[in-house]
Amino acid sequence: MMQLIITGKNMNVGDRTEKYVRQKLERLDRHLHEPVEAHVELATENTKNANQRQVVQVTLQRNGTIIRAEERSADLRAAVDAVVDKLDKQVRRYKDKQVRKRRAPVGLGEAAVAQEQETEPEPLIVRTKKFKTAPMSAQEAVEQMELLGHSFYLFLNEATGELNVVYRRDDGNYGVLEPQLD
């Protein structure tokens, strides 16, 4: 059910490592009933903290939904284990929300049961913000984000004319999100 694409950054991904990653990610198949594309990036980074040198990033894509997790550790296998645990929780939470959306209680008794089963209240959208933005480069967007003290910033990319998002990554660097429509 899962199509895996495993790549290495600053490292070679051996057969044993690839087999280990595949075995661990098979655990997610019990929650995923449709085909899923999984991009796995294994990396070794030269960080000051030796406990964060091995990095595992996994991105699951399914029917337009993206679920992503990243973990760092001194040991690659420990990072794989931790990222699979995190993904398992995210996938279960996503599936639970999908089931709750489809299930609409009819009677009062069913409503009470459904309400008792909901242990976690869903976050509400409490604010909508409209703003004007001038076309700018990704670097200018990062500067704006830093000036505002935000962890992300939506901007109109002057090179592409499209809306993009810059964000601060856990490693201290920045990333750019460029939406693609299928």
Image (cartoon, rainbow, N blue to C red):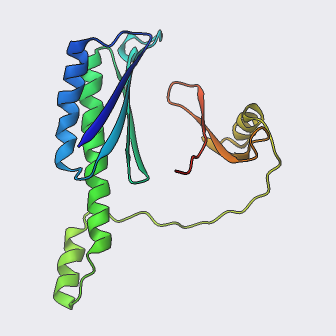
Nearer to the camera, 70 or 33? 33
Q: Position of residue 50 (x, y in %)?
A: 39, 10
Residue toward you, 102 or 73: 102
Residue 90 locus on image (x, y percent): 31, 47
Residue 154 picture location, percent across and down: 67, 48
Labels in figure, total: 0
Query: Which residue is rendered at x = 23% and y = 83% of the image?
Result: 111
Residue drawn at x 17%, y 29% as measured from the top left: 23
- State the residue lying farthest toward the bottom: 107
Residue 172, compared with residue 95, is above or below; it is above
Q: Residue drawn 45% across and 13% down?
A: 45
Q: Quadrant of the N terminus?
A: top left
Of residues 19 and 146, the one nearer the viewer is 19
The quadrant in which residue 157 appears is top right
Identity of the residue drawn at 40% across and 40% down: 68
Q: Residue lying furthest front in this view?
A: 182
| Residue 166 found in image quarter | top right
Whether residue 128 sits left or right of residue 124 in the image: it is right
Please, is residue 96 above or below residue 161 in the view? below
- Asked where in the image residue 140 lies, by quadrant, the reply is top right
Instruction: Please determine whether, in this image, residue 76 is positioned above or below residue 155.
Output: above
